[in-house]
Amino acid sequence: MSNPAEESKAAEATRTVVMERVFAHPPEKVWRALTESKLLAQWLMNNDFEPETGRAFQFRAEPMPQWNGVIDCKVLVMEPLKWLSYSWVSMGLESVVVFTLTPAEGGTQLRMEQSGFRADQEHAYKGASYGWQKFFDGLEHLLDGGAR
């Protein structure tokens, strides 16, 4: 049986990557890019995502040394046009990704939080910080009409 005090201490010891950007597009367009598998693949990774709470899915990238290229996920919470949350499990990292959409002047503010990075996962934390910046750049390109 686990110790609640230890679990609480472990939860406190985690870090979160946060990205925020205002996209010059309505929430409906940003939402589609977050929830339509073919669009998601253009800015994030290949996937079998379906916007259904409780549904398991995977992101797939090119395998690399020490990584098979697979991220196991499960849709946790979803409210269309407002927020989307899913688990993100890969290489010992068990994290949660939350997207929050907020109407903003001239478009939509998108906030992404990936939480659950332990102190011993500095490499994963730095990789995610870099990766989400690149992903957001790809999302902006897609929303602006570019194809990858």
Image (cartoon, rainbow, N blue to C red):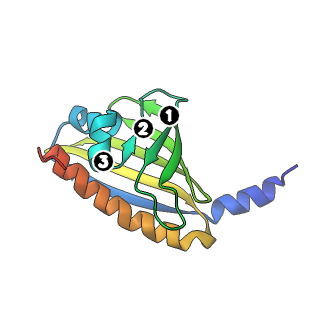
Discs 1, 2 touching: Cβ within 8 Å: yes
Residue 31 visible within the image: no
**How far from the left and from the top, in percent, is residue 1?**
88, 49
Discs 1, 3 touching: Cβ within 8 Å: no
**Left or right of 131, for residue 91:** right
The structure residue drawn at horizontal position 41% and vertical position 59%, both measured from the top left corner, is 18
The structure residue drawn at horizontal position 41% and vertical position 29%, both measured from the top left corner, is 51
Secondary structure of the residue carrying numbered label 1: strand
Q: Is 79 drawn above or below residue 112 in the view shown?
A: above
Residue furthest to the right:
1
State the residue in front, 79 or 51: 51
**How far from the left and from the top, in percent, is residue 77?**
50, 34
Kind of residue sitting beneath label 3: Leu
Pointer 1 residue:
77
Residue 40 visible within the image: yes
Pointer 2 residue:
84
Kind of residue sitting beneath label 2: Leu
The structure residue drawn at horizontal position 36% and vertical position 59%, both measured from the top left corner, is 132
Mark 1 and mark 2 lie on one chain; the one further toward the N terminus is 1
Disc 3: CA contacts within 10 A as few (<14), some (14-19) or many (>=20):
many
The structure residue drawn at horizontal position 46% and vertical position 64%, both measured from the top left corner, is 64
Secondary structure of the residue carrying numbered label 2: strand
Q: Compute the Cα span from label 1 to label 2.
A: 6 Å
Mark 1 and mark 3 lie on one chain; the one further toward the N terminus is 1
Kind of residue sitting beneath label 1: Val
Secondary structure of the residue carrying numbered label 3: strand
Residue 13's image quarter? bottom right
Pointer 3 residue:
110
**How far from the left and from the top, in percent, is residue 109?**
26, 47
Q: Compute the Cα span from label 2 to label 3.
A: 11 Å
